Amino acid sequence: MSNSIIEIKDLQFAYSRQMTLQDINLTITPGDFVAMIGPNGGGKTTLLKLMVGLLEPLAGTVCISGQPVDKASHLIGYVPQDVSINRSFPISVLDVVLMGKLGPGSRWKRNRAANRQEAMETLDRLGMAEYAQRKIGELSGGERQRVFIARALVTNPQLLLLDEPTANVDTEGQAELYSILKELNKDITVLVVSHEWIVISTYVKSIACVNRQLHFHHRPEINAEMMQSMYPHHSLKEVCPVELVAHGIPHRVLHTHEDESHD
Amino acid sequence: MIEALQFDFMQNALAAGLLASLIGGIMGTLVIVNRIVFLSGGIAHASYGGIGLAFFFGWPFLAGTLGFAVAAALLMATISLRARHRSDTIIGVVWAVGMAIGIVLLDLTPGYNVDLMSYLFGSILTVPASDLWIMAALSVLICGFVFLFYPDILALSYDEEFAMIRGTPVRLIYYLMIVLLAVTIVMVIQVVGLILIIALLTIPPYIVEKYARSLFQMMVGASLIGSFFTVVGLYLSYRFDLTSGAAIILVAGVGFFAVTLIEQISVRRQRLETWHKFEREEQGHVS
């Protein structure tokens, strides 16, 4: 048995004529907090969908906790991109969270009271209990993300996968979300897809850079070489927005490649 | 209205209208939240091809239309699942081709021709009791489907990917829903016509959507509002001797625009109130 929570071997994937992902190898150990970063269209979301089994690789394998993905879905808590969800949908916050209790065969052994209680406790843990009866569309972007995290958590996952959780969230809310994730990371492995990658560097333990290929870095140092490999057509100044430095977030962008190899 | 109900045909028309409202409210809710209004229109129009087929080959009417509509619906649903960004085009093609097949086959059938107007607007005033029983059975079937699969339908409609990961048989339930939709459309078209079924599928659920707090509430609300439109429309058609299907649709249309207008006005009033309140507070600070 391996002691990896995610193990991807020689994975290849293409939607049509171009390779979307090639030669992907990735091993993530339990307890890690990984940020998956890279340019738009670089294959981040595709890789995430391969990890949860929504897509199948052309070649190679994806294992979650040593099992193939289709047998491991109960280990995964998934938080999809907010944009893909219909906001005017008539559904309460509590009912969204209860969706996490859905599973094969659960229809016949509905345990309503216990499920509701667990959903309420999870909402409470995320500071969202008072919103339980509100319609999901009435919440702000950050509040909605917490509800989706709660929905993922009631599945009791060992691995939490989030796709661009901060896309519709203001800067303050982003920091709150990441401290929630940091707290959750005490018990479970967390993997976040993001393109606002400089903001996350203070929270995560590892960074996976995805731009058709994958480079894994065990320490959250974003260096010039990483940026060059992902944004080859831009100079450093273009991809490193100065205002992020001004917000006082520890900024480790300029570590050189030599520094990393000495570690 | 009471006096009108002495007539058998009026009782039947009312029962047919109410059943159509119930079915339309439930299936229409699913159509609206899954954003398959265009697909429903495609099924409704393409099913005319089934009418042509049934007459041309002398098949039993229901077998021909149901078979054709379900096949066309599954074709459109499959293609739109595979290539989402192209689905509107494909539906448009099937929509048009299905209808053309129906018209040409009816041209080629000697003798009796189906009246296109009754296909469009139905003949709710001449509904035979047997059709009522079929619609009642269909209502039971649809209610059963929703009751059995409610959590899965909810998850599928709200967030298909999440439902898939949780192991919900998303594809199966989606196709079941499409088949039921096709059956609904065919059965209800016979009674109330193509245009009325599209109106009942879209207008009442849309009006209720903003106020409903759950899918179930939306279904109930849409069925009730649809019934109200039907009753009022039927009364007007009786009182002023109008085409009943069209009268019901116009009542629903007036309801739709009235609700939209009232919502606009109330939003504007809220904004003004917020501003006035702000001004009063400002003045309080000054004095």
Image: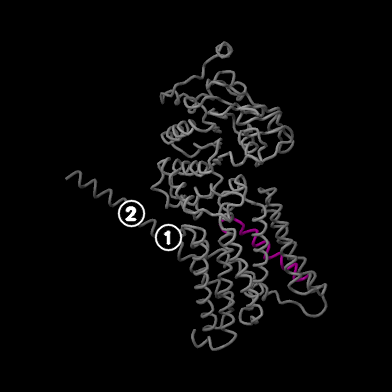
Quick one: B176 or A240, which is closer to the camera? Answer: B176
Q: Is residue A222 left or right of residue A43?
A: left
Quick one: B218 or A254, which is closer to the camera? Answer: B218
Query: What element does badge 1 sit on?
Result: helix
Image spot of residue A185 (x, y percent):
49, 31
Is B46 inside the magenta-drawn segment? Answer: yes
Q: Residue at x 72, y 63 (%)?
A: B70
Ranked by sequence position, the earlier of labels 1 and 2 is 1
Q: Which residues are magenta?
A: B32-52
- Report the amino acid beneath label 2: Leu
From the viewer's perspective, is residue A9 above or below residue B171?
Answer: above
Image spot of residue B237 (x, y percent):
54, 80
Image spot of residue A51 (x, y percent):
63, 36
Q: Which residue is mark 2?
A: B272
Q: Is residue A222 left or right of residue B72?
A: left
Residue farthest toward the left in the current orientation of the protein: B287
Q: How many numbered badges does the structure rendering display?
A: 2
Query: What element does badge 2 sit on?
Result: helix
Mark 1 vs mark 2: tell me if same chain: yes
- Colour logic: one colour
- Report the amino acid beneath label 1: Glu
Using the rendered view, name the quadrant where residue A84 is placed: top right
Chain letter for mark 2, please: B
Using the rendered view, name the quadrant where residue B22 is placed: bottom right
Using the rendered view, name the quadrant where residue A12 is placed: top right
Q: Which residue is mark 1?
A: B263
Q: Residues within 10 Å of mark 1 (few under 14, many from 20)?
A: few
Q: Is residue B119 left or right of residue A218?
A: right
